[in-house]
Image (spheres, rainbow, N blue to C red):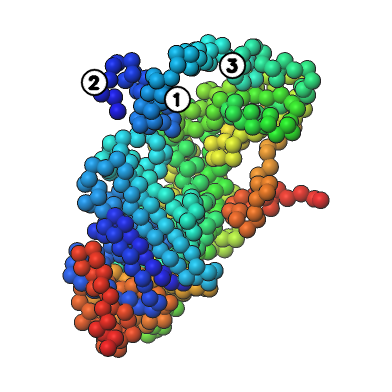
Amino acid sequence: MYITHLSLTNFRNYGRLELPLPQGVTLLHGNNAQGKTNLLEAIYYLATSRSPHTNSDIQLLNWDAAQADEPLVVGRLVAQLAAQTGEHQVEMRLIREKGRNGRSGRNNRSGRNGRSEYSFRRQALVDQRKVRLMDLLGNMRVVLFLPEDVQLITGPPNGRRRYMDVTLCQIDPIYCRTLSNYNKVLEQRNALLRQLAEGIGSMDVLPVFTEKLAALGSRIFARRATFLQNLAREAQRIHYEALTQGQETIRLAYLPRLEGNGNGRSTTTSNMEPSENWIQTHQADEKGIAKRFAQSLAETQPTDLRRGATSVGPHRDDWLMTINGRDLGSYGSRGQQRSAILALKLAEINWMETITGEKPILLLDEVVAELDENRRALLLAYVQKSTQAFLTATDPGMFTAEFLEKATSMLVENGRVYPDHQHKL
Amino acid sequence: MTTNALPQPVNRLITEFARLPGIGPKSAARLTFYLLRGGDEQALDLAQALQDLKERTQFCSVCFNITEEDPCQICADDGRNPNLLCVVEEPLDLLAIERSRAFNGRYHVLHGAISPVEGIGPEDLKITELIERVKNGHFTEIILATNPTLEGESTALYLTRRLKEFDVKLTGLARGLSVGGDLEYTDEITLGRALEGRREM
């Protein structure tokens, strides 16, 4: 799969961009703050409906356009795709309207971060037909490499959950729908728990939301367990064979929050198998997972009623990488963490190709400079094998002449993109 | 759109129109000036219609549908099956089912669905009234025709729990393909539900 044309309107520092794109490797070079990262962000956003750099999507609108006191400001991202299934067009519109309070529904994210007199909404289109936001996902699949990827290992669990969700949603529309429904049920259940903690609300409604939470949550547990197991196997192989020449073994363990105490590592019932081992053998057994999850929800109900929040469930999941048996986040060196995360990302490419039969589009934002020779060679080998890849670099001199010869170079300068052919002479 | 350049009664109507769903300040001004330029009769008819809307309608004391007379036409109709009850969220849902002409029983309108996020609990809906009605009635089947949304389904689940003590069959509407639709363009979840609910032919 590859993008044949990208069109941006009022997105970040692009007022207007019409850019035909080739297959193979494209190198985006230019000074800092010219718009290289924004191009990758636009492609990533069309694939995932999320930005890797901000949670406030209203910030994605072009600054100059957003400054204008217009009643209506529209940002538009459009990609033409050539895929196995034929040619497709995916489009996202970012719409900021003035003085229309309460019309944009629950998805209005501008209230917290944006200026309150504006409402903000998004509209997704596939082949020029309006679709639900979640139906945009899966039309275009990408794997993104960022220098800060290593924070997946060292950072807080919500980053690791987001990684699972974004990756799985690109492949599995049912997962995406289930996750969205789970979050809605969770929101309802937590609202009810808060009301009950204050002595209002009906206690006999709680079992209804608990039952729904258990049914939806068990599907998320099951799919995450299968996903991480497949990814772990591939990452381990790449890491062992290609990155450390058989010196080191990484493992990736899913830590489902099926039980109340600790990080899913201990159980409330002492004779029960720890949930991270148990889930591996039960990932196909949704009913069994639902039963165990429902039991935990029953056990934690008194705590939940006190806290006004749900303490177990996939919304508290985590996963962990170990190297030679030790926690990579706490004990791994920076170099070991980089290798592990690289192995994970490369595994993600192979996993997507196995599932869909198509290579995903690769997006690499200034990551090449960070890597030593061995890791760089491996990553660039994957890049050269890909159907389409975009790399940003302030200095194209770090690439070998041979690599540059096969790549298309483009200069990004002040919100404009100039294809140059100097390396193709 | 309201300014000092306009007389207060004009401003007031613009403001009132703009409060309605789907109408912005520009449409509100256009409607106001349309009425201003039109004949007296048209404006007064509209005023009368608005007044009647509130004064001459009420909830049916049996099914809580909106009605001019109590009990409503459907509840008063002896030709309808008294053993069959259909529970809906809103009067408009009742209207939709009536249009299908496929149902000849009685209705019960809940006036909403359970949604703790919006502060709506069972006590805010006509659920106590429903239980009373089932207790005193002779229903053999109750169709829980709430919307296929999270809130609607949760409400149906809640009603199932509350109603299972009675000797009555509880059913829900089938979920699945729309008639005249295309299998190819049906989303995964709907298709999954349709397969689950398949039936022998």
Q: What residue is shown with label 3?
A: B59
Secondary structure of the residue carrying tag 1 is loop
For image coordinates 49% across by 28% down, the residue present is B120
Quadrant in the picture for the N terminus of chain B? top left
Q: What residue is shown with label 2?
A: B4
Residue A162 locus on image (x, y percent): 39, 56
Q: Counting other residues with Cα less than 10 Å from the Cα at mark 1, is it few (<14), some (14-19), or many (20 or more)?
A: few
Q: Counting other residues with Cα less than 10 Å from the Cα at mark 3, is it few (<14), some (14-19), or many (20 or more)?
A: some
Residue B12 locus on image (x, y percent): 34, 18
Of marks 3 and 2, the one in the foreground: 2
Residue at the left extreme of this rendering: A31
Q: Is residue A201 above or below residue A399?
A: above
Q: Are marks 3 and 2 on the same chain?
A: yes
The amino acid at mark 3 is: Phe
Residue B92 locus on image (x, y percent): 59, 28
The amino acid at mark 1 is: Ile
Of marks 2 and 1, the one in the foreground: 2
The amino acid at mark 2 is: Asn
For image coordinates 54% across by 69% down, the residue present is A85
For image coordinates 65% across by 54% down, the residue present is B182
Question: Which of the two labelled residues, at mark 3 and mark 2, occupies the earlier sequence position?
Answer: 2
Secondary structure of the residue carrying tag 3 is strand
Q: Is residue A72 above or below residue B161?
A: below
Residue A341 locus on image (x, y percent): 35, 70
Q: Are marks 1 and 3 on the same chain?
A: no
Q: Separation of disc 2 and disc 1 at Cα?
A: 47 Å
For image coordinates 61% across by 34% down, the residue present is B146
Q: Chain of mark 1?
A: A
Q: What residue is shown with label 1?
A: A200
Q: A58 or A356, which is in the foreground?
A: A58
